[in-house]
Amino acid sequence: MNMEEKERPVDFIREIIREDIKNNKYGGRVHTRFPPEPNGYLHIGHAKSICLNFGIAEEFKGLCNLRFDDTNPTKEEQEYVDSIKEDVRWLGFDWQEREYYASDYFEKLYEYAVELIKKGSAYVCDLSADEIRDYRGTLTEIGKDSPYRNRPFEENLGLFERMRKGEFPDGSRTLRAKIDMRSGNINMRDPVMYRILHAEHHRTGNKWCIYPMYDYAHCLSDSIEGITHSICTLEFEDHRPLYDWFLDQLGVYHPQQIEFARLNLSRTVLSKRKLIQLVQEGHVSGWDDPRMPTLSGIRRRGYTPETIRNFCDRIGVAKKDSTVDMALLEYLLREDLNKRAQRVMAVLKPLRVVIINYPENQPENQIEELDAINNPEDPGMGTRKVPFSRVLYIEQDDFREEPPKEFFRLAPGREVRLRYAYFIKCVDVIKDKSGKIIELHCTYDPATRGGDSPLWVGSSTDRRKVKATLHWVSASHSIEAEVRLYDHLFAVPDPGEETGDFKKDLNPESLVILRSCMVEPYLAAAKSGDIYQFERQGYFCVDPDSSLWDGSSTGGKTVFNRTTTLRDTWAKIEKRLK
Ligand code: ATP
Ligand code: MG
């Protein structure tokens, strides 16, 4: 075994595939597919399935198709198809020319249905949806045969053809598989294969008014495409006998369905039905709201595809449902951003500081430019110049007039370091008529200039220490920006678990907008999607759309989305668990 092989993920699906290759099943081929229904945007749960299907194809030198499972015309739209393609690409996967649609197979699926009717394995049923449900029975009670179950096949053929021609209203008839109303598996009690739906389809228009059901369309789409391993989530385990039944009845190429546990993530919801409610009811700004667990939201928030792929590798693939802590995702995100994000200084809630002993009216060409390190994790990222001047901004939170015991930052009479600059000491606090602090007067010590040196100056015998280093910007050089601070969309780990309504658990503080932040001039060149670490604050990325929450303009201000704070809850959790 070479190194490369050793590092590959190990799980029960890959085990099955290795075995199949060894036994030359499917001629040693591996061909998977990712089959989204285009009825919403992809979320991070889908990423697990994408990484698994495309990842396996890559590892075993096979292929993976992108197949849109577009059998429900009423809920599907082109917008969703486009977003799904963009998201899969963003994750770094390529389906090459293999972009398929279940709707491409409608004609073929119809022919297969006719074949099943001719074999006596399918029949047209006139029961209504409610009646079908009543006849089906329950988990503890066997079902009852439909009175239409034994129609002669000529009659079934004629009716099915007339269903296709549009002669019957919606819901009046169905085509059902003739299996076993007494089966212990409800899915096998004569499941519906086709329903009548006079609805326009986003790709086939009005060509069809009967549409195949998922269970019938899916196995045959897999078969038509020559899929070897049809990987799906656990809820389809009870559908597998039906998957196999259709293929066996028709005697066509037979892929193998394998189920795995879906991803559940704390403090969010991963169901398109719920996500669509958040969008449509305006709880978020759209599918790509940076608080959404959608791939488009996560991307806008500043997550990298590498983080998502790494996350999917780390959580692995299992046969048992579980919930992954969001803190793991955030931990991996910080690990990734720490390596790649350029450090800058940004003051989110500015407090004016005047350095009263700094030369006044310094001519423009004499502005002091201090060297700042771009990324201590990566010296290759170099340094930049940060302008220093007589009037600065520091963070309001970094000053207390009456500092509590554990507060080591700036206070009257106290000295602190300004990052990359000087020690400053607060000598006066200026307030407005209402008593609000509007400005601090400080002195600086020219002997303390520069670099990333320690928190002290002087010789070893005559050492002067400070206890804090603050970030700052020069008032006249800084740029005003808008910063959006995001927190979890839900206030509890398991939304809806206690309240019964997930929307009751929405976090009212999931978005805080700060409109007058001051960032260092270096950020004038920041482009949409760029990610920075604002020193001491967290990671922030430039929003692609600098319009305001309400759609109005920010007046040209750059908008930064907080990707994540620097606080590392996961490390703390891990420590506690040890
Ligand atoms: P949702 O429950 O969000 O509506 P879905 O299963 O209806 O999801 P599809 O578009 O049918 O959405 O999903 C495409 C593929 O992604 C399927 O193979 C499905 O099993 C898989 N998938 C969906 N959600 C998850 C999840 N949370 N974890 C892993 N795989 C998932
Ligand atoms: Mg589905």
Image (cartoon, rainbow, N blue to C red):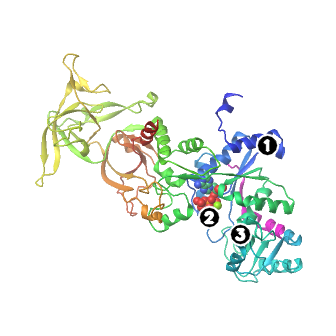
Helix, strand or loop under label 1: helix
Say left or right for 409 vs 110. Answer: left
Q: Amino acid at mark 3?
A: Thr
Specify the label residue 20 is tagged with. Answer: 1
Q: Quadrant of the N terminus?
A: top right
Residue visible at 10% across and 54% down?
A: 433
Dot 3 and dot 1 residues touching (CB under 8 Å): no
Pair 3/1: label in front = 1
Decide: is 76 above or below 153. above
Q: Is residue 108 a member of the stretch shown in magenta?
A: yes
Count residues near mark 1 (Cα–Cα under 10 Å), then give few for <14, some for 14-19, many for 20+. some
Label 3 secondary element: loop
Residue highlighted by disc 3: 204
> Principal SS element in the magenta part?
helix
Task: Determine the secondary structure under disc 2.
Answer: helix
Part of the protein shown in magenta: 94-113
Q: Which residue is mark 2?
A: 78
Q: Give the quadrant of residue 354.
A: top left
Q: CA distance from mark 3 to mark 1?
A: 37 Å
Q: CA distance from mark 2 to mark 3?
A: 12 Å
Kind of residue at disc 2: Gln
